[in-house]
Image (cartoon, rainbow, N blue to C red):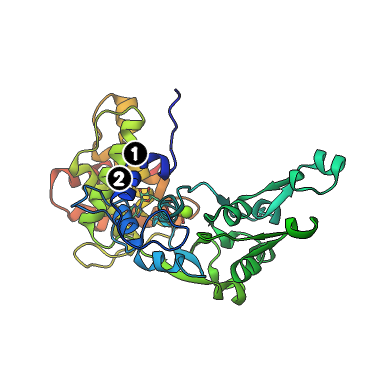
Amino acid sequence: MTERQRPPAEELYTEELANLARQDRGPKPPGWRLSPQAIRSFIMGDEKLGIRAKIVGQSSLRCLVTLATNRGLMLVGEPGTAKSLLSELLAAAICGTSTLTIQGSAATTEDQIRYSWNYALLLAEGPTPKALVPAPLYHAMKRGQLCRFEEITRCPLEVQDTLLSVLSDRVLAVPELPGEDGLVFATQGFNLIATANTRDRGVNEMSAALKRRFNFETVFPIDDLKTELALVKRESERWLKNSGVPEPLADDVLEVLVTTFRELRAGLTESGDATDRLSTPMSTAEAVSVAISVGVRAHFLRQDVANPADVVECLVGAAVKDNSEDRVKLKRYFEQRVSKRKGAHWKAFFDARKVLEK
Ligand SMILES: Nc1ncnc2c1ncn2[C@@H]1O[C@H](COP(=O)(O)OP(=O)(O)OP(=O)(O)O)[C@@H](O)[C@H]1O
Ligand SMILES: [Mg+2]
């Protein structure tokens, strides 16, 4: 069988979810597959049950409470802070599917959210339930599952407002269909998880009416180095193996990479000194991608293990995107901060800085 590049969470963790369901004695909100306690263990990890944390440094408890109420959940935060991952895990654990997902963009239309028509059937038979093509929101309401709405704030405001009546009355009207077929009532278990990132187009423009129908949960970057290092190590190891790279990154290479990301993200060194903050978001997700590139580069280009110079090569593409000022800031960071660090790995990192000139 051809292997999937990235299976959805419910497939990746089928066994874990089944084990949790077997042992779950906690009360479950109507329509949920697991109790909030079991879902918390699934997401935040549980040593006793042998489950590892999938989201680190955040609490998912408030999200779970919101999803059991009549309000939608809105995850907001900087790019790359695992909002999408959290929403995927929540959906997989609560209703067994994380794929009823709408990807918000400037081109998203109501059809892609609610339903559209099979035009051949529509012309032949007129509007009938058979000619209706359900979109994720329709499916989720009918089946009592969670609908995910990614990057909701990238959609035009009038499209976002499609959700107003669904979130308050829990019913979707299909005016073309007569009688009962024209109303889709949400069944138990239905709710909506939206994500929005603060860099693109913030939530400020979202209508007050829609804001009121969501509980907002801010997702923050991981706040300590040790936790972030462990996460980047674990994730890059998994992805590198997937990409055919046998050797994971050495700890000192990871330390250089993650420390640099954290300092350029916060504009503050680990020892508390001010430094330049880049305009590009230096997120944990981005650090994982750079770690993967570093490993791939070393293995496929040199048949060797990765070193700090590979980090400089791969860092440039992640840190300097559309703002040339960032290159200047990056160079300054090397001269002022990296130069003072002790250890052979930091020296090798500093010595490779000429790549920044290219
Ligand atoms: N707190 C965290 N716990 C676990 N993984 C994290 C965390 N923060 C970042 N990550 C990493 O980020 C990846 C997920 O990023 P994701 O796409 O979910 O971020 P996002 O917040 O949705 O970003 P964007 O706003 O760009 O859509 C994970 O696969 C993981 O490698
Ligand atoms: Mg996302």
The x, y position of residue 302, in whole percent, is 29, 25
Left/right of residue 321 with respect to residue 131 in the rendered view: left
Q: What residue type is labelled 1?
A: Ile
Q: Point out the frontmost of discs 2 and 1.
A: 2
Numbered tag placed on residue 292 in the rendering: 1
Label whose residue precedes the other's in the sequence (2 or 1): 2
Tell me: residue 282, above or below residue 165: above
Q: What residue type is labelled 2?
A: Asn
The x, y position of residue 308, in whole percent, is 24, 41
Tell me: residue 200, above or below residue 10: below
Which residue is identified by label 2?
Answer: 19
| Label 1 beta carbon less than 8 Å to ligand 1 | no
Q: Residues within 10 Å of mark 2 (few under 14, many from 20)?
A: few
Left/right of residue 275 with respect to residue 94 in the rendered view: left
Tell me: residue 83, above or below residue 98: below
Q: Do the residues labelled 2 and 1 touch (CB within 8 Å)?
A: no
- Label 1 residue SS: helix
Looking at the picture, tell me which residue is in the foreground, 20 or 277: 20
Q: In the rendered image, which quarter is residue 156 located in?
A: bottom right
| Residue 354 in view here | no
